[in-house]
Structures are given as C-alpha cells and as structure tokens.
Image (cartoon, helix red, strand yellow):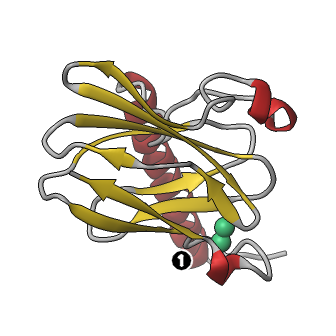
Amino acid sequence: MHLHKYEKIWLAFGVAALVVFLSVVGVSAFSHDHTPAGGMETIDPKKVNETAPFDKPGVTQLDDDTYQVAVVSMAFGYNAPELKVPAGKEIIFKVTSTDVVHSFTIDNTKVNLMVVPGQITTKSYTFEKPGKYLILCNEYCGTGHHLMYNEIEVY
Ligand code: CUA
C-alpha cells in the first residue's frame, strides 16, 4: 500500500493528537485521584436487603446536622418509606439497585444520581426550601419505568 506524503503527515498528526489527549485525561485523572461521581463503594446486589444501611431503608439521623437517607431502587419503585427530612441540614443519600440501572432524581434539585446494581451511589445535599419534592427515575429500566417515582418531604 502506498501512502501519499500528506496522508502520512495527517496520520502522524492524528496519532500524536490522540496520544496527547489521552495523556492529559489519564494524568489528570490519576494525579487528582478522580473517582466516579457517586463514589466507589460496592455491594452484592443479591444481598442488598440484608446489608446495612439498606436492611432498614429510610431516614436515619447521624448527628445534629446530618441525616442519612438509604434508598433501594428496583423495577419499578423505590424502597424508601416515610422520606421526611429537615431543610438546612446535610442529607447524605445512599442509593443502590437490586436489579438494573435506574436513576434517583429529585425534581428541582441538583440530586440526579445514576443507580447501578453492585454500587452504592452517595450524594450529599442540603434542601433550602421546605416542601414536597418528586423523586423519579430517568434511566429507562423497563416496561414500568414511567411508574417509578416517590416523594420526599422537606420540613
Ligand atoms: Cu427505574 Cu426507570
């Protein structure tokens, strides 16, 4: 196969650009110790219901200013009874799935988590305004996807 001189130059340029790009991404990821946005915690998806904190899903007060909310996602709903949390306090959401990929999205907030079986997704959030917030799944997860929602009350 004969390559024209200009083709070789462009090929070399393309390969060099790729090497530079991947090096920048790789070096910055390792030097800044990047992890997935939701954290690196794992869980056996078959043992979710017997693994803390998902054996008792719902709200737990950790200290005066911190609450934990454990939620189990499954087709097609959230196991999260009585979600009531105070405004102005740190709420740590911990969410996992027993089956497929879902999301845990709270309407009108910056909480928009991908929920992956085998992983525990963690996100800290502080609600500014009291009210009732819709929780919904925005990852298509099956025929009941549109039925997958819940509510959290902020007081
Ligand atoms: Cu769960 Cu869509």
Q: Measuring 56% from the left and 61% from the top, which residue is drawn there?
A: 103
In this picture, residue 11 sits left or right of residue 27: right
Q: Nearer the viewer, residue 140 or 85?
A: 85
- Compare residues 145 and 113 and report the one nearer the observer: 145
Q: Residue at x 59, y 26 (%)?
A: 53
Horizontal relation, residue 28 to residue 102: left or right: left
| Mark 1, residue position | 6
- In the depicted structure, whether residue 94 falls above or below residue 16: above
| Crowd band around label 1 with a 10 angstrom C-alpha radius: few (<14), some (14–19), many (20+) | few
Ligand 1 quarter of the rendering: bottom right
- Quadrant in the rendering for residue 143: bottom right
Residue at x-position 78% and y-position 76%: 142
> Residue 51 placed where, x, y %?
72, 24
Mark 1 vs ligand 1: CB under 8 Å? Answer: no
Identity of the residue drawn at 32% across and 57% down: 153
Q: Secondary structure at mark 1?
A: helix
Examine the image and state in which quarter residue 52 appears: top right
- Quarter of the rendering occupied by the N terminus: bottom right
Q: Amino acid at mark 1?
A: Tyr
Residue 33 lies, with reference to residue 92, above or below; the image says above
- Residue 104 at x, y = what percent? 51, 58
Residue 56 position within the rendered picture, expressed as x and y whole percent measured from the top left:
62, 31
How many marks do you count on the picture? 1
Q: Nearer the viewer, residue 94 or 64?
A: 64
In percent of width and height, residue 75 lies at 76, 64
Which residue occupies the foreground of this view, 121 or 106?
Answer: 106
Please give left or right for residue 145 compared with residue 109 in the image. right
